[in-house]
Each structure stands twice: as C-alpha cells, then as structure tokens.
Amino acid sequence: MQAHNATGDYRESIRSTVRLALWTLAWAASLALAKFGPERAWDSQQPVASWAAVGANLAIGIGWIVAFTRFLREQDELQRKIVQDALGITLGVGWIGGFAYVVADAAGLVTYDVDIAAVPVSLGVVYLLAVIVGKIRYR
C-alpha cells in the first residue's frame, strides 16, 4: 500500500513538473510576442494590440506563479529545501547586486549601461547553480 502511495506521489510530481514546464513555455512565448509583436506581427502604432500582448503576458505569468507554487507543494521535503535555499541565494544576489549597481552608477563609477535583459539571465544562472550545488550538497 505504501509503495502505491509513493508511486502516486512520484506521478503527481512528474505531472506538476510537466505543468510547470508548459506554463514556462507559454509565458516565454507570450513574452516574446509582447516584445517582438509590435515590430513583426502588427504595426507598432497599434497600442491596443501591444497592451493586449502585455496583458496576456501578465495573466500567463500569474498562471506560472500558481503552477510554480503547486510544483513546490508537491515536492518532497529535501527537494523543497534545495529550491528554497536556491531561491534565497538568488534573491540575495539580485537584491545586493542590484543595489550595488545603483549605488555605483549614482557615484559615477559605472562607465557602461547594463542591458536589463542581462539581469534575469544572470539570476537564472545563479538559481541553476544554487540548485546544482544543493543537490550535490544533500546527496
């Protein structure tokens, strides 16, 4: 009976992972549409289409947040701890690094502008590395 529960829990974990992956792909596609749509899919002089794309991106993003919280709830305690630690590290790096950049820029120490797209990419790399380190640490 216990093996059946473990198998069921494992299947539910896979389902939540697949749902999260689908929501992630949908959000990335809606972000691409909102970013590149005014240039390639419709005339940039049509703000209604652009606002609709941004609204859709926000709505899908909320769906992604819900899928991520469900994903976390369906993980075992160790996996949840690894993800929680990785999220804490990522938040800290973003918070401390972001404010350090703001202070350095205000002091005139920054001689180049950082492309804002580099921030989420950098945070994604920090998160992935923190998850990998966490998995190795708790092996």
Image (cartoon, rainbow, N blue to C red):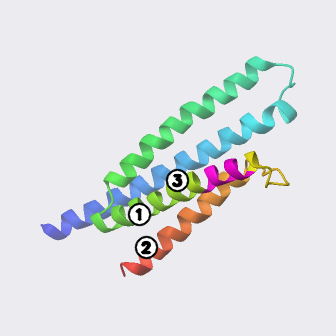
**What is the secondary structure assignment of the residue under circle 3?**
helix
- Circle nearer the viewer, 3 or 1: 1
- The residue pinned by badge 3 equals 21
Residue name at image x 50 percent, y 73 percent: 132
Residue name at image x 74 percent, y 17 percent: 48
Residue name at image x 12 percent, y 67 percent: 1
Q: Crowdedness of circle 1 by 10 Å Cα count: few (<14), some, many (20+)?
A: some
**What is the secondary structure assignment of the residue under circle 2?**
helix
The kind of residue on which mark 2 rests is: Gly
Q: Quadrant of the C terminus?
A: bottom left
Q: Is residue 111 left or right of residue 133?
A: right
Earlier-in-chain disc, 2 versus 1: 1
Q: Which residues are magenta?
A: 97-104
- The residue pinned by badge 2 equals 134
Q: Who is closer to the viewer here, 2 or 130?
A: 130
- Residue 123 within the magenta-colored segment of the rendering: no
Q: Crowdedness of circle 3 by 10 Å Cα count: few (<14), some, many (20+)?
A: some
- Circle nearer the viewer, 3 or 2: 2
Q: State yes or no: discs 3 and 1 in contact (Cβ < 8 Å).
A: no
Mark 3 → mark 2, Cα distance in angstroms: 21 Å
Residue 130 x/y as whole percent: 50, 69
Earlier-in-chain disc, 3 versus 1: 3
- The residue pinned by badge 1 equals 85
**Magenta stretch secondary structure, dominant:** helix
Residue 89 x/y as whole percent: 48, 62
